[in-house]
Image (tube, rainbow, N blue to C red):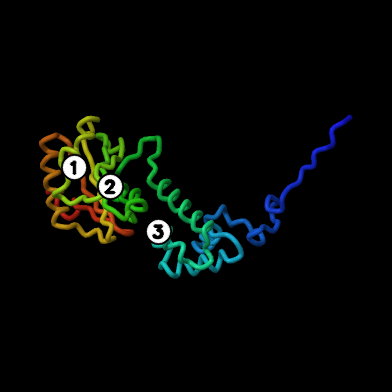
Amino acid sequence: MSAEPTSITTGLRDRPGSATAAGSAQPHLPDAGRMASDAELVGRLIGGRDGPLASRLALHRFGGLAALAAASPHELDTLPGVGPRGRDRLVAAFELGRRAVAFWPDRSWRVGAPGDLAERLLPEMGHLDREELRVCLLTTKNAVISVITVYVGNVAGSSVRVGEVFRDAVRRQAPSIVVVHNHPSGDPTPSAEDLRLTRELAQAGRLLDVDLLDHLVIGHGRWVSLRALGALL
């Protein structure tokens, strides 16, 4: 007795261009999404028939994409038309974006100017809700060896131990470093403690034969170089 043929069916939601439970399928994004507006991309993440309108309302409420990306899950829950699935998609997408920008390529990457490092870390560190201090280890040709998080939480100058900042540089024989920390307030203006810490680190670096090339302060969409301000002279 032969076996009955197996029936293979494809759900409507699996068919390109077919309607889904959340509404009709949307057209493909132009040029793989690179030409799409912020509202279009956010609307795709939210999904459903209400996605486009919910996206515009969300961007308007937060004042733009950068602020929306920094919103907490609780804040996203208050947005009309987003829902739990849309919230989770937004949280995941923004976190992946931050990680992708902060990811160091496998090949050697050279820091030609303070802005090279600041622009790489700004999307991730600019919206942290607590202070972090990181140390970028460099070769003699300013190629990045590693970026190490040394402190999380209170990065007041009085709490930072100079030995901790230089520990990995000495251990890995890095000839120079760049120190980076963020201001959760969003204002990257260096404090008196930042200036004092920079002077102490520069002095320690000279004793350890590790050059402190710069100390960068990261804010919301902005950064400040303490070398440019003359704090390392």
Q: Work out whether residue 153 or residue 168 is closer to the camera in this orientation and state it.
A: 153
Q: Is residue 68 above or below residue 119?
A: below
Camera-nearest label, 2 or 3: 3
The residue type indicated by label 1 comes to Leu
Q: Which residue is mark 1?
A: 212
Task: Looking at the image, tell me whether mark 1 or mark 3 is earlier in sequence order.
Answer: 3
The residue located at (80%, 38%) in the rendering is 6
- Between marks 2 and 3, how big is the CA–CA gap? 33 Å
Tell me residue 55's x, y (percent): 51, 65
Q: Work out whether residue 128 or residue 83 is closer to the camera in this orientation and state it.
A: 83
Q: Which residue is mark 3?
A: 72
- Residue 59 in the figure: left or right of residue 165: right
Residue 232 seen from this side: no
Tell me residue 228's x, y (percent): 19, 53
Helix, strand or loop for disc 1? strand
Q: Work out whether residue 213 or residue 54 is closer to the camera in this orientation and state it.
A: 54
The residue type indicated by label 2 comes to Ala
The residue type indicated by label 3 comes to Ser
Tell me residue 45's x, y (percent): 53, 57
Residue 113 image label: 2
The residue located at (17%, 36%) in the rendering is 210
Residue 192 image label: none
